[in-house]
Image (tube, helix red, strand yellow):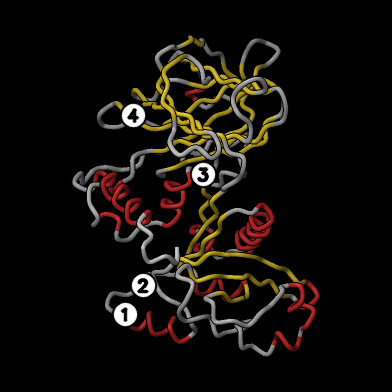
Amino acid sequence: MNDPAEIWPCILQKAYAKLHGSYARIITGDPLHALHDMTGFSTLRFDDSFAEGSSKSENEVFEDLLKAVKGGYTIIFSTPGKASKKGEEDQLSEQYKSVGLMTGHAYTILDAKEFPDINTRIMKIRNAWGHGIEWNGDWGDNDEKWDQYPEVAQECNFQKADDGTFWMTWEDAKKYFNGGGICFSHTPAYDYRINSAFSDTIPSCVLEVDVSSPTWITFVISQEDKRVHQDEDDYEYQAVLINVAKPCDDEKWEIAVNSTVSGVRPSPDKWTFIQGRDVSLIQKFEAGKYLVVPRIIEASKSGVTPYVFGMISNKEVGADLSVRFLTIDESSRVFENFPKFDATLTPVDDVQYQKRPPGAGFPLTSVGDHIE
């Protein structure tokens, strides 16, 4: 990235602009959307937790941060780009500059530590630009606390350097950042994408997934970005949900988990339709058979809602993991949020899907009744 002759970022930017219709449409935007688009991995958003401000939600966010750091995931926090009152942007910018931060900017979280003995939770943060002003508050590079608590400095491997990296308390992070999230990047990752559509409220296909041994799988419903439809005043993301069911003894299916606002916290007994571009469910599936049903709360105005149904697993579809494409009858009570339901399932043999194994540059497109 330090090579002045590097051209791949320019090529990537041009491709991204063509996808969205123009360079103007990608000047600003949601960094979590960009991470999802560039990596394919699911994301977890913190914006609502920051806005709620409750101690429970804030503690859950920090717990998620600790787990994400341990898992090696990509974590970002963002600062507000606009003031709460019109015309106060300059004042907001100066306020942030005075403490060594930038407005309308994304920062990456490199580490998070908790020290109960001194009631301190701190995070290692990096300016994505790698240079410029740095945080000058508590636990900043020049703060005397590093000398007062040498055990903390040792645990954090603290090194004073003008490199765009700094430490900040969780309390200050809540004060100055207004959102962010986690991108659940992992290796190995076998990525499968299925071209799909809702006809009224019925998905074009559901998945029968057979797992032979414990497997981590991410399912995600992705709708077209609003940027692609900027000329359409009435375009909105539809509220969607992912049901995962397992077979019962009485030849019915029973809900195992449903997607929620948090992709890493699926629920066995709540049906939460989320109005968002990408809605995901991340779960460790034990050996067994599962039925995965994409859902939409109501039909769109056109009656047809296109989407891409994604599946990312830590194992390749093959001997230990199989996936079949099926249609489900519209009379099934899964569409009425019943925890147990009958389902007439019919194989469908003309489903278009893509697969990309780890390290592959481009996905391979296939058509069939199952993932090969």
Type of the residue with mark 1: Glu
Give the distance between the C-alpha atoms of the residues marked 1 and 4, in whole angstroms.
42 Å
Sequence-wise first label, 1 or 4: 1
Identify the residue under disc 1: 88
Circle on res. 299: 4
Sequence-wise first label, 2 or 3: 3
Type of the residue with mark 4: Ala
Identify the residue under disc 3: 41
Q: Is residue 17 left or right of residue 307?
A: left
Q: Secondary structure at mark 3?
A: loop
Give the distance between the C-alpha atoms of the residues marked 2 and 3, in whole angstroms.
32 Å
Give the distance between the C-alpha atoms of the residues marked 2 and 4, in whole angstroms.
35 Å
Sequence-wise first label, 3 or 1: 3
Identify the residue under disc 2: 84
Label 4 Cα crowd, 10 Å radius (few <14 / some 14-19 / many 20+): some
Please give the name of the residue rendered at 70% of the width and 68% of the height, measured from the top-left corner.
113
